[in-house]
C-alpha cells in the first residue's frame, strides 16, 4: 500500500477542512444564520416544537394574572424587536397555567396570557396575522404543581418560532 504524498496530503486536508467548515455554518432549515444567531442571543433553544425561549427568559405571570409586569414587558418587547430585526415574522405564543382552578378557567386564562404577550409583540412590529396565539391551560406543565415554586414556573407564555 502506498502512502499519500505531500500534495495528496495537502489536498486531502484542504478538502476535509472545507467539508467540516461547511457543516458548521449550515443554518437550521427555513432560517438564515443571522436569524439563528438572533434567536440564540435572546435565549431561544431548538426543541421538537421549533425555537423555544429558554427557561431563564420565560414570560411568567402571578396567580390568576394575565397582565405583564413593567420589567417583563420591556424584556418581551426587546425579544420582539430582536426577532423582527432579524427578519423573523412568524411566532407562536403558547399560554400556560398551573393546575389551580377549573380546566375551563385555566384554558381561558392561558389564552389571555398569550394575548397579553401578542399585544407587546405588536408594538415590536408583528402584525396580527404573524402571531399565532394558543391557550394550553394546565396541560403541559414544566415543573411540579405540588410546590409553590413549580406552580409559579408553570404560569407562563412560551414564545416559539416554528421552522417551516
Image (cartoon, rainbow, N blue to C red):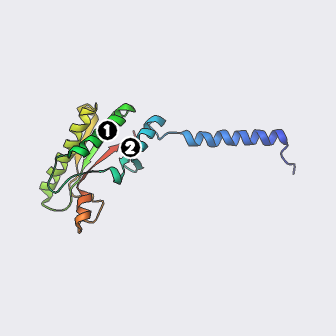
Number of the label disc, if any, that sits on residue 163: none
Q: Is residue 150 left or right of residue 18?
A: left
Write down the residue under mark 1. Answer: 78
- Depth check: give the residue in front, 164 or 112: 112
Q: Is residue 104 above or below residue 24?
A: below
- Residue at left 15%, top 52%? 65
For label 1, count other residues whose C-alpha is less than 10 Å away and answer few (under 14), some (14-19) or many (20+).
some
Residue 26 spot, x, y in % from top left:
53, 39
Quadrant, the C terminus: top left
- Residue at left 76%, top 38%? 11
The secondary element bearing badge 1 is classed as helix
Q: How many numbered discs sit on the rendered protein?
A: 2
For label 2, count other residues whose C-alpha is less than 10 Å away and answer few (under 14), some (14-19) or many (20+).
some
Quarter of the view holding residue 145: bottom left
Residue 112 spot, x, y in % from top left:
16, 46
Q: In this view, does 44 lie to the left or right of 107?
A: right
Residue 115 spot, x, y in % from top left:
19, 42
- Residue at left 24%, top 68%? 147
Quarter of the view holding residue 99: bottom left
Residue at the extreme right of the image, as rendered: 2
Mark 2 or mark 1: name the one nearer the start of the chain.
Answer: 2
Residue at the extreme bottom of the image, as rendered: 146
Q: In this view, does 118 lie to the left or right of 160?
A: left
Residue 58 spot, x, y in % from top left:
30, 51
Whether residue 134 is visible to the viewer of this picture, yes or no, is: yes
- Residue at left 46%, top 35%? 34
Number of the label disc, if any, that sits on residue 42: 2
Whether residue 32 is visible to the viewer of this picture, yes or no, is: no
Give the alpha-carbon distance from disc 2 to disc 1, as whole Å: 9 Å
The reply to whether dot 2 and dot 1 touch (C-beta < 8 Å) is: yes
The secondary element bearing badge 2 is classed as loop
Amino acid at each position: 500500500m502506498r502512502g499519500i504524498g505531500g500534495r495528496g496530503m495537502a489536498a486531502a486536508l484542504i478538502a476535509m477542512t472545507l467539508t467540516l467548515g461547511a457543516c458548521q455554518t449550515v443554518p437550521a432549515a427555513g432560517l438564515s444564520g443571522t436569524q439563528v444567531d438572533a434567536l440564540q442571543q435572546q435565549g431561544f433553544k431548538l426543541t421538537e416544537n421549533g425555537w423555544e425561549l429558554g427557561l431563564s427568559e420565560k414570560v411568567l405571570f402571578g396567580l390568576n394574572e394575565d397582565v405583564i409586569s413593567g420589567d417583563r414587558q420591556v424584556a418581551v418587547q426587546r425579544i420582539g424587536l430582536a426577532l423582527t430585526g432579524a427578519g423573523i415574522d412568524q411566532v407562536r405564543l403558547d399560554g400556560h397555567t398551573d393546575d389551580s382552578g377549573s380546566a375551563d378557567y385555566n384554558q381561558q386564562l392561558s389564552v389571555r396570557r398569550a394575548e397579553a404577550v401578542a399585544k407587546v409583540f405588536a408594538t415590536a412590529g408583528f402584525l396580527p396575522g404573524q402571531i399565532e396565539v394558543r391557550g394550553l391551560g394546565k396541560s403541559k406543565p414544566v415543573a411540579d404543581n405540588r410546590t409553590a415554586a413549580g406552580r409559579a414556573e408553570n404560569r407562563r407564555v412560551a414564545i416559539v418560532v416554528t421552522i417551516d
